[in-house]
């Protein structure tokens, strides 16, 4: 009896296969899908292959306009009349470091932006920074830059807008450019017992977090964070969709309260229950196999006269 475990090594190879591999075949497609999504996200926007204007639209326009007023970052029209190119290049290469360096101008623009720290932008090089500053200089001379920002209506939101935004969020109405519905990755506190997806943050109060209508709308027109950018870069939201979503998020934020975490608790409990049920199910399915393995072992032993 005490010698039992080592005997496993005498198991015929096909038995081992059955026990160790057949049992675990099912998760592989999920890993593959997840891996493919991550790879797609990582390579969707090969930074080096972009023209400065495209690079600006995808990485900067969510926070900056040229001649359209400040968003979360300053209006960049004539920025080189405020600060010289050497400083700006150094800043673009690593904004957080320059902002923390004690530099007086940095402290001033940081304060004017209410403490929002410009992130380090992936793919930034000295060459690209120069190309972007050239672009900004050229755009500043135009009467109307292509980066003046979204022309969004400032009409007050109506109940119809809120409803439209909700339908878009939930994916009940498709996004014109084919973007994925928000609910597959996000929740808002009242989107149903289980809430929405868990990949992205809860958006119940995002209207406040992104500082209101103008900044939120600009953000949605050119999301600059990795997952959002990968999901929407080929499928931008249209102006009327942004208007409706902003209406929906404003209404959600106005109802106040904390961002709902019970969704994740429900999810967790469901997961726990699901895992339990799965174990029970697997047990009844696989028990037969373990029995037959044991039978092989036991019988083998009997046959060999042990
Ligand atoms: C998440 C928002 C955000 C993104 C994205 C962003 N910036 Fe900024 N940027 C800011 C903020 C905020 C400031 C003001 C300094 C501070 O508080 O960080 C700033 C400052 C600047 C300044 C100095 C402005 C001045 O008035 O002196 C330049 C130039 C600049 N950004 C260019 C860019 C470029 C080019 C990109 C894209 C490659 C970019 N920014 C992306 C938020 C952003
Ligand atoms: C593929 C999953 C996915 C989809 C689809 C998606 N998001 Fe996101 N979203 C994320 C993730 C993840 C983040 C966190 C930042 C990041 O990694 O991009 C995020 C961040 C955000 C943020 C910033 C939140 C904050 O607190 O700063 C907003 C706003 C947002 N998403 C809105 C939307 C809207 C509106 C839609 C639908 C039109 C949507 N998202 C669809 C995954 C997604």
Image (cartoon, rainbow, N blue to C red):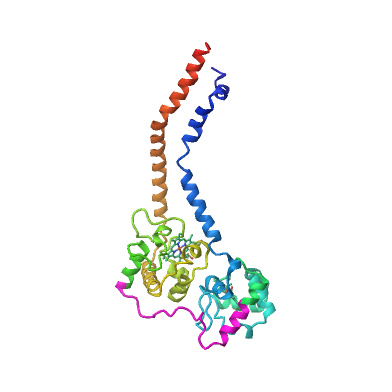
Extreme-top residue of the structure: 305
Extreme-right residue of the structure: 86
Residue displayed at 36% across by 71% down: 244
Q: Position of residue 54 (x, y in %)?
A: 54, 73
- Give the vertical position of 244 relative to 301 (above or below): below
* Ligand 1 located in image quadrant: bottom right
Q: Position of residue 232 (x, y in %)?
A: 46, 65
Residue displayed at 47% across by 22% down: 294
Say whether residue 26 is left or right of residue 129.
left
- Give the vertical position of 209 relative to 271 (above or below): below
Residue displayed at 54% across by 20% down: 4
- Give the vertical position of 224 relative to 1 (above or below): below
Extreme-left residue of the structure: 160
Could one spot residue 120 in this view of the protein? no
Q: Which residues are magenta?
A: 132-160
Q: Quadrant of residue 8?
A: top right
Residue 80 shown in magenta? no
Q: Quadrant of the N terminus?
A: top right
**Observer-nearest residue: 228 or 189?**
228
Residue 155 shown in magenta? yes
Q: Position of residue 114 (x, y in %)?
A: 54, 74
Q: Position of residue 251 (x, y in %)?
A: 36, 69
Say whether residue 104 is left or right of residue 55.
right
Say whether residue 42 is left or right of residue 179.
right
Could one spot residue 14 in this view of the protein? yes
Residue displayed at 49% across by 51% down: 34
**Observer-nearest residue: 172 or 3?**
172
**Observer-nearest residue: 267 or 288?**
288
């Amino acid at each position: 009896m005490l010698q039992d475990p080592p005997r496993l090594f005498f198991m015929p190879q096909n038995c081992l296969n059955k026990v160790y591999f057949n049992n675990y075949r099912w998760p592989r497609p999920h890993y593959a899908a997840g891996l493919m999504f991550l790879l797609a996200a990582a390579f969707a926007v090969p930074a080096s292959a972009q023209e400065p204007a495209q690079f600006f639209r995808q990485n900067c326009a969510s926070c900056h306009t040229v001649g359209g007023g400040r968003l979360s970052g300053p209006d960049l029209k004539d920025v080189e009349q405020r600060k010289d190119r050497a400083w700006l290049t150094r800043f673009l290469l690593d904004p957080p470091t320059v902002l923390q360096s004690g530099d007086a101008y940095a402290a001033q623009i940081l304060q004017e932006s209410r403490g929002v720290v410009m992130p380090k932008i992936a793919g930034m090089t000295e060459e690209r920074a120069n190309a972007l500053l050239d672009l900004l200089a050229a755009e500043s001379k135009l009467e109307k830059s292509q980066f003046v920002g979204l022309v969004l209506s400032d009409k007050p939101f109506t109940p119809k807008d809120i409803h439209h935004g909700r339908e878009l969020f939930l994916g009940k109405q498709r996004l014109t450019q084919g973007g994925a519905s928000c609910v597959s990755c996000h929740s808002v506190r009242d989107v149903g017992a289980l809430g929405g997806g868990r990949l992205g943050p809860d958006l119940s109060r995002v209207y406040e977090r992104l500082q209101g209508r103008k900044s939120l709308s600009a953000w949605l027109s050119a999301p600059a964070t990795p997952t959002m950018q990968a999901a929407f870069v080929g499928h931008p939201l249209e102006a009327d969709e942004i208007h409706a979503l902003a209406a929906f998020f404003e209404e959600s934020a106005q109802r106040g309260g904390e961002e709902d975490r019970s969704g994740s608790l429900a999810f967790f409990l469901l997961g726990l229950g699901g895992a339990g049920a799965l174990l029970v199910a697997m047990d009844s399915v696989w028990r037969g196999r373990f029995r037959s393995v044991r039978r092989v072992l036991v019988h083998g032993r009997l046959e060999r006269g042990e």
